[in-house]
Every structure is written in C-alpha cells, then in structure tokens.
Image (cartoon, helix red, strand yellow):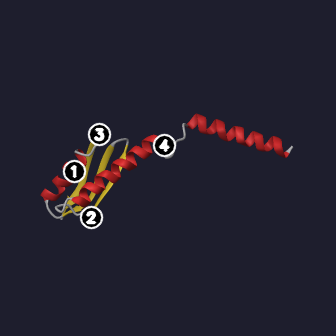
Amino acid sequence: MKLAHAVLAAAAALILVQLTGCAVARDQQTVGSYIDDATITTRVKARMAEDKSVSATSISVETLNGTVQLSGFAKSTEERATAERLARSTPGVQAVRNGILVR
C-alpha cells in the first residue's frame, strides 16, 4: 500500500512538471530563459564594473525575457547614458528600460 502511494505521488509530480514546463517563476519563465536572463545580467554588470565612468555598485540590473531594467542613481547624465549604452551593446539584450535617476 505504501509503495502504491509513493508511485502515485511520483507520477503526480512528473505530470505536474510536464504540464508546467519546469516554470521557475510566477511569470512562468522556463529554466532556459531564466539562465539566459541571469547570463545577460551578469554580462551587463561586468561591463559596468570594467568601465570606470560608471558606478556599478550604484546601479541595479535585472533582466526578464531579454529586457534589461536599469535602476539606481547616477552622478551625471553622461553616466546614465553610458550605463544604458553598455547594456544595449551586451549580447542577448532585446531591450533596455533605463530607470536610473541622476542626483
């Protein structure tokens, strides 16, 4: 009887995974898409860290389905524009939403 319950539970879990497509977030993003977005975020942050005209620690980067969202604070409009340019020129980026505020 216990074996039957275990087999039934395993089958139910398998069916659930197959139906949801291994979604990893509320927006039903697939595992592959999640990994792609994490890679894009890492690349954008690395480019900002390499560029001395951008304060990478003051700017947040989030990616969803290839769209990069920049937020945080810049010291000048040039820094804001450079951060956006770096994000746009990163491989895999589909679009950039620049929410960086200049203080």
In-image side of 102 versus 28 (left or right): left
- Pick whichever of labels 2 and 4 is earlier in the sequence: 4
Secondary structure under the numbered disc 1 in the rendered image: helix
In-image side of 13 versus 69 (left or right): right
Residue in the image at 22% along x and 64% along y? 55
Task: Name the mark on residue 31.
Answer: 4
Which of the 4 image quarters holds residue 4?
Answer: top right
| Tag 3: amino acid | Gln
Secondary structure under the numbered disc 4 in the rendered image: helix
Give the image location of residue 70, x and y in percent: 28, 53
Q: Is the C terminus in the top left, top right, bottom left or bottom right quadrant? A: bottom left
Of marks 2 and 4, the one in the foreground? 4
Task: Name the mark on residue 58.
Answer: 2
Work out which residue is located at the far right of the displayed protein and give it. Answer: 1
Task: Name the mark on residue 86.
Answer: 1
Residue in the image at 29% along x and 52% along y? 44
Q: CB of mark 2 within 8 Å of CB of mark 4?
A: no
Task: Name the mark on residue 94.
Answer: 3
* Inter-mark Cα distance, 4 to 1: 26 Å
* Inter-mark Cα distance, 2 to 4: 29 Å
Which of the 4 image quarters holds residue 7?
Answer: top right
Density class for disc 3 (Cα within 10 Å; few <14, some 14-19, many ≥20) is some
- Pick whichever of labels 4 and 1 is earlier in the sequence: 4
Work out which residue is located at the far front of the displayed protein and give it. Answer: 50
